[in-house]
Amino acid sequence: MEDTRRTNKHGRRLIYLNPADTEGTIIEFCDYPEKENQV
């Protein structure tokens, strides 16, 4: 399984998992130290 890691203009790390395995699920990690939100 391949993971494509991108950073959007807001400075957040967007991790796109293989659509064939996750049905196009997008996991977004916030890099802000004050908030540690993992969706």
Image (cartoon, rainbow, N blue to C red):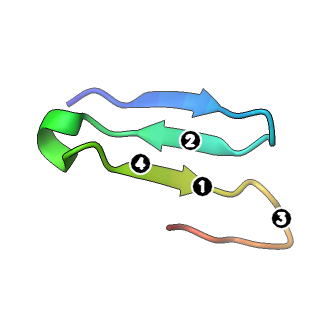
Residue 5 at what x, y percent from top left? 51, 30
What's the residue type where badge 3 is placed? Pro
Q: Earlier in the sequence, mark 4 or mark 3?
A: 4
Q: Residue at x 22, y 36 (%)?
A: 19
Indicate the secondary structure of the residue bearing disc 3.
loop
What's the residue type where badge 2 is placed? Leu
> Which mark is nearer the camera, 3 or 1?
1
Give the residue at mark 1.
29
Q: Earlier in the sequence, mark 3 or mark 2?
A: 2
Mark number, residue 2: none
> Which mark is nearer the camera, 4 or 3?
4
> Which mark is nearer the camera, 3 or 2?
2
**Residue farthest to the left, as pictured:** 20
Q: Earlier in the sequence, mark 1 or mark 2?
A: 2
Mark number, residue 14: 2
Indicate the secondary structure of the residue bearing disc 4.
strand
Give the residue at mark 3.
33
Relative placement, left or right, of 15 versus 17 is right
What's the residue type where badge 1 is placed? Phe
* On screen, residue 32 above or below 4: below
Instruction: Kindly report the distance in space between the C-alpha atoms of the residues bearing marks 2 and 4.
Output: 7 Å
Instruction: Tell me where residue 1 sits by quadrant.
Output: top left
Mark number, residue 26: 4
Relative placement, left or right, of 36 versus 24 is right
Instruction: Tell me where residue 2 sits by quadrant.
Output: top left
> Which mark is nearer the camera, 4 or 1?
4
* Contact? badges 1 and 2 (CB < 8 Å): yes
